[in-house]
Image (cartoon, helix red, strand yellow):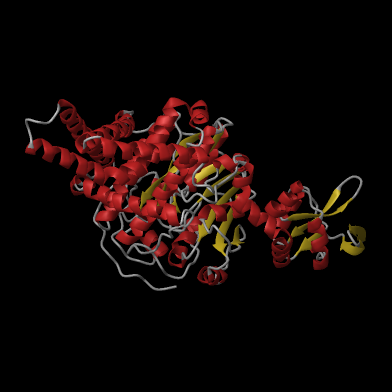
């Protein structure tokens, strides 16, 4: 028996016949979509974007809905919405773009700028900051002109030494803290207790790593009907569109296309996709990421037992190609110190954490409440971690790994590092707009951690070569005129040398600890760290130039350049048939490598996608044997 509803539109009425058989719902006429979208209130817009449900008629006792065909239709029935019509997916997407596209894009770009302008990096400097920096420059130039050069340089070294001493002290706190971080086991959740999990994956010119990315996402040990994976493409990225179009993606994948516009940044793309995300929890993975399969389950369990103000969990990042060359080894030690020593210590002390750019797990509601990502900040992760702390939320470390591709090329590494430094500078300037308020929100210990991890990173890399030159100058002056130098300059020179040696020693010792913890000590890497820091100086000065001429430009990091990265045609690997061991990684990558033990601080790469195998990993750092790429997409 047929049921007839009258759908009232803005220009009259439209009558469609709805068949009573729920498995054969009629198609909602496309010409009705415009009038329906026009009268949606904010809550109904959220329902439409996140769950693909449109209210089509309002009765005295209930609202009638139309659902987009596919999984959305099934979910609507499961949640007792009882849809009376279905919408063709392509028609729905076209209507969303036509009628809501401008509003969605404006939210993605300007939301934080409009809602919380003090937290947005759209302005590089506030007037008070310009005045303050101007006064400092005038004072220093006056000192250069009016005081002996020796005194000015000595005093500069003294100020640098005091700041670096604070940075070194924070590292010492992290290094000298508890050894291996205690891994508290959260109560496991069964499938019925698990929430919907959104996974955002921004992709821009990433065809070379698409195959291994999709294989890794397919290995996530999480109920598929609770997964909400968004592949985020830029509108002008034709190659990615073609690569994705050639795939038969599972139903829990959705492709989100971000319209062209400025700034073209990762946080803007994430903000755009966030509006379509239906998960109670949400995480981000980069294109080259290989998360451990049980990472989502672990995060869901920690959130379930954690306090309500626990907003974020940061998983550990490691590299699957750590032993490829000198740069990757230095990068691997640096990452291990950060994710195995520094971040756990900061979390343990309740200090702000500079988040990594990937594998951040959020409570989605809190993420939206704090304004999500700043589309103008090129290290949106570090900024968001600081903003969460300022607004009273906490961040913890998740004991699960995500494996990434370490940069193998010097130019690519410098470009990536320059973007990071520029973003750290943006973040520091944003959160130092009102220092008194900052102190009230995070306290002196939080300010210490923020200065050391954010400003300390860019400042130390920028002045490291200059600082060394000043020390050499002071030593040369004392050697030339040993009887005429003052006690003050001698003391400052000695202090500078001590602080420099403490910085070198603390960093090398931290590297030694993580190397020892993971089974092999790279003495060559540890002893050549100062040369790695000089390279950071090059990237730091480049970042300052880019901050002036192109503050919102996103330096694109090339992925898929490692010899261990597959560049073959993407495909999906069934979870149930994946063996643990070298055969599995060969199936994922299409390569036969001696890949066991090449993972930085991770373990056997062959066990990437097997949760049971990961629990039995043994750390090893065997040398990687290079292999030829298996093909071109």
Q: How many marks?
A: 0
Counting from the top left corner in percent of width and height, residue 404 is at 39, 54
- Quarter holding residue 143: top left
Above/below status of 201 relative to 460 = below
| Left or right side of 615 for 200 | right
Q: Position of residue 27 (x, y in %)?
A: 80, 66
Q: Residue furthest front?
A: 146
Q: Quadrant of residue 397?
A: top left
Position of 499 with respect to 462 (left or right) is left
Estimate the x, y position of residue 315 in percent, counting from the top left: 44, 43
Closer to us: 466 or 259: 466
Toward the viewer: 108 or 340? 108
Q: Can residue 604 be seen by looking at this rendering?
A: no
Horizontal side of 335 relative to 8 (left or right) equals left
* Figure quadrant of the N terminus: bottom right
Q: Is residue 193 above or below residue 212?
A: above
The quarter of the rendered structure image containing the C terminus is bottom left
Could you say where residue 537 lies in the image, as x and y percent from the top left?
A: 29, 49
Residue 476 in which image quadrant: top left
Look at the picture and state if 115 lies above or below 578: above
Judge from the rendering whether residue 598 lies leftward or rightward of residue 454; answer left or right.
left
Residue 392 visible in the picture: yes
Nearer to the camera, 201 or 540:
540
């Amino acid at each position: 028996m047929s049921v007839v509803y009258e759908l009232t539109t803005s220009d009259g009425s439209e009558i469609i016949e709805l068949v009573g058989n729920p498995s054969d719902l009629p198609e909602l006429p496309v010409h009705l979509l415009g009038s329906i979208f026009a009268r949606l209130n904010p809550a109904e817009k959220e329902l439409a974007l996140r769950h693909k449900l449109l209210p089509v008629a309002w009765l005295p006792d209930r609202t009638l809905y139309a659902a987009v065909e596919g999984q959305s239709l099934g979910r609507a029935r499961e949640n007792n919405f009882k849809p009376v019509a279905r919408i063709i997916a392509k028609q729905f997407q076209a209507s969303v773009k036509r009628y809501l596209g401008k509003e969605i894009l404006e939210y993605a770009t300007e939301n934080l700028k409009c809602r919380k302008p003090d937290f947005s990096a759209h302005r590089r400097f506030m007037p008070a900051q310009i005045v303050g920096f101007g006064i400092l420059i005038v004072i220093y130039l006056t000192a250069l002109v009016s005081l002996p050069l020796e005194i000015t340089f000595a005093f500069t070294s003294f100020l640098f030494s005091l700041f670096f001493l604070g940075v070194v002290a924070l590292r010492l706190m992290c290094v000298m803290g508890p050894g291996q971080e205690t891994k508290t086991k959260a109560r496991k959740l069964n499938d019925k207790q698990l929430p919907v999990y959104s996974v955002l994956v921004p992709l821009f010119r990433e065809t070379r790593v698409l195959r291994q990315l999709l294989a890794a996402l397919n290995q996530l040990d999480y109920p598929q009907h609770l997964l909400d994976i968004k592949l985020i493409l830029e509108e002008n990225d034709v190659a990615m569109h073609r690569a994705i179009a050639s795939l038969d993606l599972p139903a829990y994948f959705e492709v989100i296309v971000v319209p062209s516009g400025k700034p073209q940044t990762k946080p803007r793309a994430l903000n755009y996709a966030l509006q379509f995300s239906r998960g109670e929890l949400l995480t981000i993975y980069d294109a080259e990421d290989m998360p451990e399969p049980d990472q989502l389950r672990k995060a869901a369990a920690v959130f379930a037992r954690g306090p309500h103000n626990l907003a974020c969990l940061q998983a550990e990042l490691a590299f699957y190609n750590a032993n490829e060359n000198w740069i990757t080894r230095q990068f691997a030690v640096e990452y291990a110190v950060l994710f195995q020593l520094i971040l756990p210590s900061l979390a343990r002390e309740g200090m702000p954490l500079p988040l990594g750019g990937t594998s951040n797990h959020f409570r989605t509601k809190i993420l939206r409440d704090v304004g999500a990502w700043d589309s103008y900040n090129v290290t949106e992760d570090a900024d968001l971690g600081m903003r969460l702390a300022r607004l009273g939320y906490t961040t913890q470390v998740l004991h699960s790994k995500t494996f990434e591709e370490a940069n193998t090329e010097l130019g690519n590494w410098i470009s990536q590092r320059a973007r990071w430094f520029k973003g750290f500078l943006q973040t520091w300037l944003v959160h130092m707009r009102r220092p008194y308020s900052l102190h009230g929100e995070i306290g002196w210990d939080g300010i210490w951690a923020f200065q050391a991890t954010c400003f300390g990173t860019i400042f130390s890399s920028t002045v490291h070569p200059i600082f060394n030159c000043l020390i050499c100058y002071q030593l040369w002056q004392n050697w030339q005129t040993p009887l005429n130098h003052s006690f003050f300059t001698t003391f400052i020179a000695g202090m500078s040398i001590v602080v420099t040696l403490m910085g070198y020693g603390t960093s090398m010792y931290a590297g030694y600890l993580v190397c020892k913890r993971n089974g092999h000590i790279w003495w060559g890497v540890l002893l050549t760290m100062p040369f790695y820091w000089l390279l950071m100086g090059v990237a730091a000065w480049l970042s300052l130039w880019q901050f002036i001429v192109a503050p919102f430009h996103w330096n694109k990091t090339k992925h898929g350049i490692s010899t261990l990265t597959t560049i073959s045609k993407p495909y999906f690997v069934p979870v149930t048939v994946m063996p643990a061991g070298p055969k599995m990684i060969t199936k994922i990558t299409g390569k036969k490598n001696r890949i066991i033990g090449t993972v930085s601080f991770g373990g056997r790469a062959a066990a990437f996608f097997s949760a049971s195998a990961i629990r039995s990993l043994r750390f090893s750092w065997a040398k990687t044997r290079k292999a030829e790429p298996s093909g071109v997409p």
